Amino acid sequence: MSPMLAVRDLKKSFGGIVAVDGVSFDVHDGEILGIIGPNGSGKSTLFNCILGQLRPSAGDVHLDGRAVTGLRPCDLNRLGVSRTFQLLQIFPQLSVRDNLILAGQEHRGNMMSRLIGRPDAGLSPAANRMLEFFRLDHLADQQAASLSYGQQKLLDAAMAFMAGPRLALLDEPAGGVNLTMLASLRDRLKAINVERGSTFVVIEHNMEFVMALCNRILVLAEGRIIARGAPAEIRRDPKVIEAYLGH
Amino acid sequence: MKRARRPLAAIVLALVAVFLLAAPFGFKPYGIFILTMWAVMTVAAIGLNLTLGYAGQISLAQAAFVGIGAYITAYLTTRGWPFWSTYLLGAVSCFAIGWLLGYPALRVQHHYLAFVTLAFNTLVYLIFRNEEWLTGGIYGISNVPRPHIAGWSMNGPREFYYFCLAHLALVSLATWWLIRSPWGRAFVALRENPMRALSLGVDTRRYTLMAFALGAGLGGISGALYAPLVQFVDPTPFALMLSLNLLLMVVVGGSGFFFGPFLGALVAVLLPEWLRFTEGFYLMGYAVLVMLLMALCPSGLLGLADRLTRPANKEAAEAPVTRRDAAAQREGAR
C-alpha cells in the first residue's frame, strides 16, 4: 500500500547548524504516528518543513504520491492537511464558534461566494457539532480569550479538525494541559481517528500520552531518526534511553 | 452580552440618523459644509479602518488615495466627463493602485510598512505639485462641477450633503456586510495571527492585498466626493498631514470597531470647529484633548464605551490596540 505521506531524506540547516539531517519516513492511511525526542532534536523544524512553513534545504515530501515540497501552508491545508502548533495559536478576539468557522470557511466555495454568501459560510451547524464533540458547546459565544488555557488547547485542536482533514500534524497537543483535560483530549483524538479515519502525526513529550495514543513511534535525536517501532519496543530501546538520559 | 446591548445601540443609532437627516435645516451653509466634510472623511476613514483596524496593515497612504480620487474627478469633470464615470474610474484606479501598494506588506510589517506607505504618499503629493501639465501644480484645478442625478442638481449645500450622506450610508452597509462575511473573519485572522490563519487555508497573501485595495478604493470614493464638495483641488490637502489625520480618526474612534471611523472623524473634523470659540487656542486645546484621550484610552472612544458597558463578571479581554497586543495576549495565555 502506498503511503499517504512520504518524507524522503529531508534536511534543514540554519547556517552551520543542521536541525534536520536526512529524515525519511512514511505515514499510512488511518495511522497515528508519534514523533518523540529530546528538546532541540528537530521535531518542530521537521513539521515546519513538511508543512511549508520552512523551505527544506534538501529532500522531498509527497502526499498521496504527489510532490508537495515547498507548497504554501494554505495550499497544503486545502489538500486536506492540517496542523496545530507547539505554542497555542487561536484567535483570541473572535468567539469560540467564529474560531471554528474560520478554520473551515476557506474550504467552502471561492473568494466571491465567501463575500456574497452567508456570513457563517453555512458552517454554524458543523461548528456546533465540533464544539459538542470537544465539549466546548457551552462556551460557543464566548470570546476565545476568556477561555481557560486547557479549553483554549481543546479549541486549538478542534480548529485543526474543523475542515475534516485526512492528515493532521499535531505539535505537542498535550503541552501544559492538566490531567483531566489530557484524558479528554486523548479520547477525542482517538475517537476522531476511529470514527472519521483521520491520520495523525503527533509530536509529544508526554510519554504516557504518546504511548497510549500512537500505533508507531519515531525517535529523533540531533536531527536524525535513531529508532522506530511500536510503543513497547521504543520504551525498551537502549538508544532511546541513552538519548533521553544521556548515558 | 452583545445581544443585551443591542436595544441601546439601536436607539442611539436611530437618534443619530434622525439628527443627520434633520441637521441641514438647523445649520448655516458653513455648518452644512463641515458636516458634509465629515461624511466624506468618514468614507476615507472607513477604508483605513478596513486596512488597519481589521486587517492590521498600517498605512500612511490614505491621503494619496483621497487625492487620486479627487484629481481624477476634478480633471475629468472639468473636461465634460459625466460625474459617475469619473467616480467609478477614481474608485477602480485607487483599488488597483492599493492592490499594488499591498505587495510591500507581504514582505515588511509595522513601522517598516508605515515608511513604505509614507513614501508612497509623498511621491503622489510630489506628482500633484510638480506635474503642472496634468494637475495644475500649486494652482490646482478649480470650478469642479457638482453632479446632477437624474436631472436633480446637487449644487446646493443641502442637496450635496444628502448626496454624500447617501454615499456614506451605502459604504457603511457594504462594509458592515463585508466584516460580517468570511472575508471580515479572515481580515481579523490576518491581524491577530497570520501564521495560524495560513495553516487553516486562509490565503493571507490575497487577503492582505485585498485589504489594501479595498481601503484604497474607499479612499478614492472619498476623493471623488471631496472634489465637487470643495469645487477646487490643489496638492496641499493631500499631503502626509491628511494621512496622519485619517489615522487619528481611526485610532481615536476605535481601531477595529465598526463605528470607530464615524466617531473619529467627528472628533477630527468637527471638534476643531467647535473649539473655535477659544480663538487662537483652539488647535492647542484640540491637541491636548487628543493626547488625554490617547493616554487614558488607547483603544479609542469605542474601546472606552465597550469597557464601560461590559458586565463586570465578563473576563473577556478588550480589543487589542495592535497586533503586538494580540500577540502579547497569546503569550500570556501560554
Image (cartoon, rainbow, N blue to C red):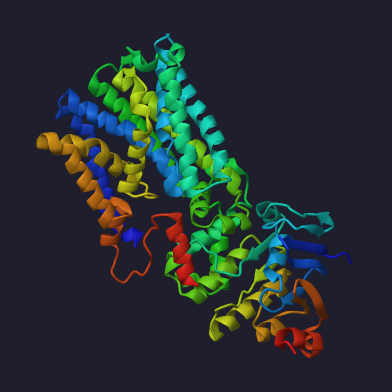
A184 or B49: which is nearer to us? B49
From where the camera sits, is residue B297 visible?
Answer: yes
Q: Residue at (40%, 50%) from the top-left corner?
A: B256
Q: Please identify the quarter of the rendering in which residue B309 is found.
A: bottom left
Q: Residue at (71%, 85%) from the top-left corner?
A: A244
Q: Residue at (18%, 25%) from the top-left corner?
A: B30
Residue A164 pos. (x, y %) = 66, 62
Residue B140 pos. (x, y %) = 36, 16
Judged from this view, the residue extending furthest toward the right is A1
Residue A235 pos. (x, y %) = 76, 88
Q: Residue at (27%, 45%) from the top-left corner?
A: B13
Q: Is residue A102 left or right of residue B65?
A: right
Q: Does B253 sit above or below residue B315? A: above
Q: Is residue B303 left or right of residue A213?
A: left
Q: Is residue B10 left or right of residue B55?
A: left
Q: Please identify the quarter of the rendering in which residue A229 is found.
A: bottom right
B175 or A230: which is nearer to us? A230
